[in-house]
Amino acid sequence: MPSDTKIEISASLLRKLHRIHRQRADLAAQIARGPRQITAGESLVAKAEENLQSLKDTLKKANLVSDEKQLQLKSREAQIDQLQTKLNTAASNREFNLLKDQIAADKQANSVLSDEILEAMDHIDGLETKLKDVTAELENQQSDQKTRITEVEAKTSELQGELARVNAELEQSEEQIPGAVMVEYRRVIKAKGEEALAPVEDESCGGCYQVLTTQYIDRLRMSVLIRCPNCNAFLYMPESTRV
Ligand SMILES: [Zn+2]
């Protein structure tokens, strides 16, 4: 049942209050979006940094492997030279043949190693090309983030200006709320935000769709303050309905 205490409040004031509360909620949501956009951008930059670091590590390892193989090649070439000298002064056929076999084996091993070095260098070339791309990607992400921060800051300051204007409008409108409902109004606004008010739509509460009895509707038409029996919202007649 509607409350027996008949407090009169105009539908236009409730409409206005609801419109302002919706605007405030919308502005607050837009303002809250800014930091989330910046955080998301930070993740993109961090990911690009991670990719670059990982590629640098891979490249460093590939260079180490290649350097090691080249050292090994040089040392074996020196060994072959030494064996060649020994071969030239071999005291016996047996020593000669042993040295010859050793030289052949070392040359074969070096041929395999040379191929491996070429492969390693190709791999390094590929990694260096990729490094340029990944570095460019990081620079793009950093530049995008810088732009993003500037845009979010400008937008936030604009939204905050708008919010201040809406808050001032709210304060002004709230002065017209009958004193007897003020405490309750504040409590419901605090608890439900913009859902503290609801228009009547098709004889139902526009907030929770609770069907309202004719008694409720009649009292509403007389500008009596009515709360939705289900969701407790302050009900009002929408503009299209003539009161
Ligand atoms: Zn309701």
Image: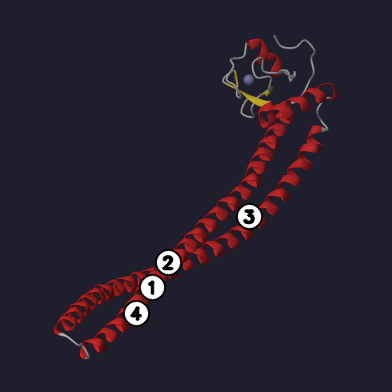
* Residue assigned mark 1: 68
Indicate the quadrant where residue 123 lies.
bottom left
Q: Residues within 10 Å of mark 4 (few under 14, many from 20)?
A: few
Regarding mark 4 in the picture, which secondary structure is present there? helix
Q: Which amino acid, by three-letter code, is at mark 3?
A: Val
SS state under label 3: helix
Which amino acid is tagged 1? Glu
Q: Earlier in the sequence, mark 3 or mark 1?
A: 1
Q: CA distance from mark 4 to mark 3?
A: 61 Å
Mark 2 and mark 1 lie on one chain; the one further toward the N terminus is 2
The residue carrying pointer 2 sits among few (fewer than 14), some (14 to 19) or many (20 or more) residues within 10 Å by Cα, namely: few
Inspect the image, locate mark 2, and give the three-letter code of the amino acid beneath it.
Lys
Question: Relative to 166, does residue 134 appear above or below in the rendering?
Answer: below
Q: Position of residue 169 (x, y in %)?
A: 77, 40
**How much space separates mark 4 and mark 1, taking CA atoms?**
11 Å
98 lies left or right of 211: left
Which numbered mark, 3 or 1, is in the foreground of this view? Answer: 1
Q: Amino acid at mark 4?
A: Ser
Question: What is the secondary structure assignment of the residue under circle 1?
Answer: helix
State which tag comes first along the sequence, 3 or 2: 2
Q: Which residue is mark 2?
A: 61
According to the image, label 3 marks what residue? 152
Gap in angstroms between the C-alphas marked 3 and 2: 41 Å
Expressed as whole percent of the image width and height from the top left, the position of residue 193 reads 69, 31
**Front-most of 121 and 102?**
102
Local packing at callout 1 (Cα closer than 10 Å; few below 14, some 14-19, many 20+) is few
The residue under the point 34% across, 79% down is 75
Residue for badge 4? 75
For residue 19, side relative to residue 129 (left or right): right
Mark 4 / mark 1, whichever is N-terminal:
1
Mark 2 → mark 4, Cα distance in angstroms? 21 Å
Q: What's the mark number on residue 157?
A: none
